[in-house]
Image: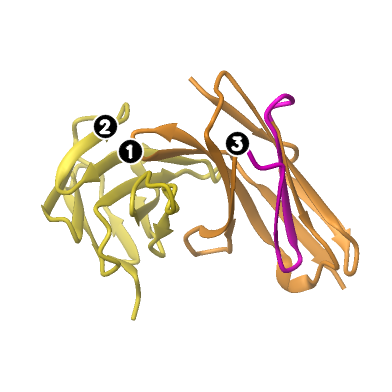
Chain colours: A yellow, B orange
Amino acid sequence: DTAVSQTPKYLVTQMGNDKSIKCEQNLGHDTMYWYKQDSKKFLKIMFSYNNKELIINETVPNRFSPKSPDKAHLNLHINSLELGDSAVYFCASSQGDTTLAKNIQYFGAGTRLSVL
Amino acid sequence: SQKIEQNSEALNIQEGKTATLTCNYTNYSPAYLQWYRQDPGRGPVFLLLIRENEKEKRKERLKVTFDTTLKQSLFHITASQPADSATYLCALDSGYSTLTFGKGTMLLVSP
C-alpha cells in the first residue's frame, strides 16, 4: 500500500499545453506539499497546504495552480507549459511541526515532466 | 533567506570505510535538522532527525551530529556498503511546517 502516490509517473507534452499531476496520501496527514527538482537535483518547495488551505506559495509562476479537494489529495495543474517547466515534481505529506513528528516528510515517487 | 551547503556534490569511498557528509547552513537557527536518502528515480526517504538541543543521534550504522555554534551537521555511515550508494540530502526546519533542502551529496561506495 503506497503511502504517497502520484500520477502519472512520466508526462511528455508539447509547449503551450495544460496538464495536471495528481497526488494522494493515505497516511492521515494534514499537510501536503509540491516540490520541484530540477536537472541539478535541487529540491525546491513550491506549495504547502494544511488541511486543504494554502500555507506557503513560493515564487512560482501563476501558471501553476494547486488544488486540494480534501486533505488526502493535492493536485497540481499547470497551464501553458514552457520548456523550463521540465523537471521532476514530487508530492509529499507530513503530520506538520508537532513535538514528535517534527515535519518529517513522506515523498511520492515523482512525476518526470518533459516539455518539448 | 537560508543557505544550505553540502560539502561536495559527490563522494567516493571504499566498502567498509566510514563515509562522512557535511551540511553547513547560514542565516538561520533551525530547531531541528533532518537527513534524507534519495535513490535514482525515487523520492527522498527520511533517515534521521536531530533537534537543536541534541549533539548526536544514532540509528544502526548511521550517526548524525549537530553543532549549532558551527552551524553544521555531520552525517556518518560506518562500515559502508555498496547498497549505501545514493544521494543524501540535509534539510532544515524553515517554519510553517516546511523544510529547506540542500542540494545533496552523491555517495558512491565501491566494492
Residue A18, horizontal then vertical, whole percent: 16, 48
Q: Which residue is mark 2?
A: A57
Label 2 residue SS = strand
Question: Is residue B62 shown in magenta?
Answer: yes
Extent of the magenta region: B52-71
* Rendered position, A56 above or below B34: above
Report in which chain the residue with disc 3 lies.
Answer: B
Left or right: residue B5 versus residue B46 is right
Question: Is residue A76 shown in magenta?
Answer: no
Residue B31, horizontal then vertical, whole percent: 52, 34
Residue furthest toward the left? A69
Residue furthest toward the bottom? A1
For the residues bearing labels 1 and 2, Cβ distance under 8 angstroms: yes
* Rendered position, A47 above or below B111: above
Give the spatial CA distance, label 3 vs label 2. 27 Å
**Image point 32% across, 30% down: which residue?**
A58
Name the quarter where the C terminus of chain B is drawn.
bottom right
Residue A7 visible here: no
- Looking at the rendered structure, the kind of residue marked 3 is Glu
Q: Which residue is mark 3?
A: B52
Looking at the picture, do discs 3 and 2 lie on one chain?
no
Label 3 residue SS = loop
Residue A108 visible here: yes
Residue B61, horizontal then vertical, whole percent: 76, 66
Report in which chain the residue with disc 1 lies.
Answer: A
Q: Which residue is mark 1?
A: A46
Report in which chain the residue with disc 2 lies.
Answer: A
